[in-house]
Each structure stands twice: as C-alpha cells, then as structure tokens.
Amino acid sequence: MNEEEIKTEDIIPEEEDVVEFVYNADGEEDLKATLKKVRKDLKEAKNKEGEYLTALQRERADFINYKKDEAERLKGVRSYAEENFILDLLPALDSYDMAFSNREAWEKVDKNWRIGVEYIHQQILKVLADYNVSQMTTKVGDTFDPNLHQSMETIETDDKEKEHTIAVIVQSGYKLGDPSSPSGQARIIRPAGVKVFAIK
C-alpha cells in the first residue's frame, strides 16, 4: 500500500451511504481528492440513474404496447366470434325468407300465429342491425356482380338484354358494417345466392 495515500476504508469499515474521505500522508483530509472521488461517485450514480430510467421507460413503453396489442387481439377475437354467430344465424333467416316467399300459403296460416312469427323475424333482424349487419339489396334484373352475388345456377335465355342479369334470388346476401360510418366501409359476409341468365 502507498504510504502517501490512506483511504477511509482502511480506517473504518465500508458502509453504504457513507461519504468516503480521502486523507493524505499527514492524516489530514485531502479536499481535492475527496471532491474528485465525490464527483466520480456522483457521475456513476447519475449513469446508473440514467440506466434505471431508460430501463423503466422501456418497460413502460413495452407495457403500453402490450396493452394495445392485447386490446387489438381481444377485438379480433370478439369480431371473429360475432361474425361466426351471425353466420350461424343466417340459415334461420333463410328459412323465414322461404316461408314468406310463398305468399299464398303464408296467407292461409292462422293470422295470430303468422303475426307472432313475423314479430320473431323482426326481432332477429333487430339483433343483426345491432351488430351492424344488414341485408343487401338485390333485385331480379340486376346485373350479376361476382363481388356481391354467388351464381348457384344459370338459366338459358334467348334475350341478349337479360344475359348476365339475375333471374332468381335463391338466398339473401348480408353485409357487415355501415358505409355511412367514419370508416365508410361495409364488408360482404355472405353474397346473395342467385340464378343468372345466360345466352343459349
């Protein structure tokens, strides 16, 4: 050990949070050396503080990103579940459409019973509307559009003007979303099933 420099750790045991003084060979405190040591310790403490702060900020940002990702994932799961629920409900609506399409037979059904069934049908449509699902407007005579319609059969015709137009609507189409909403988009969840005229 150098006799010219005696450190306090040689005199008293090292304790945390105790400022260590540097002494010269005469046993007096060396203020320059002590100040130099305090500055060095302060610089190290600031560096550690910066590392801890950076790590904390990184952890906080990771947590915020995790929360956003989790919210998006849950939104996707919910959307998937809702869409499956809707798709499972559509065959029931198809059954209503078939029952209502035969107007003559439907009118023969007891009036009270008919009103009750029509009310249930309206309730199902209301549930779909609450999920932002609506029936697509498809009419006989519309031009066939593969983005909106699914051809289930072709019907031969000699009339050139009827070619590629809808002859019969077999199954209603449904869309999800509202074109008047801020996103302005509606997505087809089931195209309308149609029969299409084709030239012989």
Image: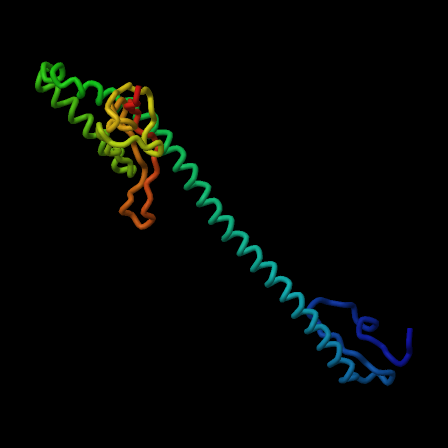
Q: Residue at the spot x=34%, y=35% of the render?
A: 188
Give x and y (percent) for residue 22.
79, 79
* Residue 81 position by quadrant: top left
Drawn side of residue 81 relative to residue 1, left or right: left
The quarter of the rendered structure image containing the N terminus is bottom right
Query: Does residue 40 appear left or right of residue 139 in this picture?
Result: right
- 22 or 87: which is nearer to us? 87
Front residue of this view, candidates 29 and 59: 59
Picture quarter containing residue 29?
A: bottom right
Q: Is residue 32 above or below residue 136?
A: below
Residue 19 in the image, given as x and y percentages of width and height: 71, 74
Q: State left or right for residue 113 relative to residue 157.
A: left
Question: Could you tell me which residue is drawn at 14 percent across and 22 percent down?
Answer: 116
Percent coordinates x, y for residue 187 in the rendering: 35, 38
Tell me where residue 9 sits by quadrant.
Answer: bottom right
Q: Is residue 49 above or below residue 109?
A: below
The structure residue drawn at horizontal position 47% and vertical position 49%, both measured from the top left corner, is 68
Q: Is residue 52 left or right of residue 142?
A: right
- What is the image's colouring? rainbow
Work out whether residue 44 or residue 138 is closer to the camera in this orientation and state it. Answer: 138
Count of numbered circles on the image: 0
**In this picture, is 20 found above or below 120?**
below
Quadrant, the C terminus: top left
The x and y percentages for residue 183 are 34, 48
**What residue do we see at 56% from left, 60% from top?**
57
In the displayed structure, would residue 100 be above or below residue 56? above
